[in-house]
Image (tube, rainbow, N blue to C red):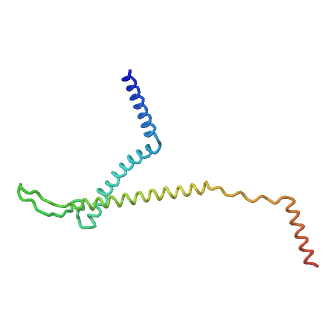
Amino acid sequence: MENNDKVKKLKEKGATVWQEFKEFSLKGNVVDLAVGVIIGGAFGKIVTSLVNDVITPLLGILTGGIDLSQARWVIREAVGDTLPELSMNYGIFLQNIIDFFIIAASIFLVIRLFNRLKKKEEKKEEVQPPPEPAPSKEELLLTEIRDLLKDMKENN
């Protein structure tokens, strides 16, 4: 009998954990984050292609045909089959730095565009204060009486 109670409790805990996981995974923030990661990965591929296929060849032309991705510093030449070449591929590092700056600039420009569009939307949504209501008949009559009394005082 005790084993059946333990099994029931474990099943209930499993159902509770599953329910909590479903609530967590279906929250809007998690879905938005997943979409952002997928789009970010695709955007990264586009920027990498831009750097590798457009900017790097242009830099090669400007620098006299130097292929930046092939730039390296050879620390030790290969010696037969016993010692392999030891080198630092700083060109790939420089290319990754260029990737980073292009991605950062692109994200900055996109966020800047979104902020400008958001400000325009907020300006449209701003409620203008209602115009002051026209003075009532009593106010107009009192204003007229005041003006007449001023004129009478000035004439005396």
- Is residue 31 depicted above or below 84 in this figure? above
Residue 132: x %, y % from top left: 75, 59
Q: Residue at x 41, y 35 (%)?
A: 17
* Quadrant of the rendering where the N terminus is positioned: top left
Quick one: 70 or 80, which is closer to the camera?
80
Q: Is residue 112 left or right of residue 93?
A: right
Residue 149: x %, y % from top left: 91, 71
Q: Is residue 137 left or right of residue 59?
A: right
Quick one: 69 or 135, which is closer to the camera?
135
Residue 145: x %, y % from top left: 90, 67
* Quadrant of the rendering where the C terminus is positioned: bottom right
Q: Residue at x 44, y 34 (%)?
A: 19
Residue furthest toward the bottom? 156
- Is residue 32 depicted above or below 47 in this figure? above
Total of numbered circles in the picture? Answer: 0
Q: Is residue 2 left or right of residue 27?
A: left
- Is residue 60 depicted above or below 6 in this figure? below
Residue furthest toward the right? 156
Residue furthest toward the front? 2
Q: Residue at x 38, y 46 (%)?
A: 38
Q: Quadrant of residue 31?
A: top left
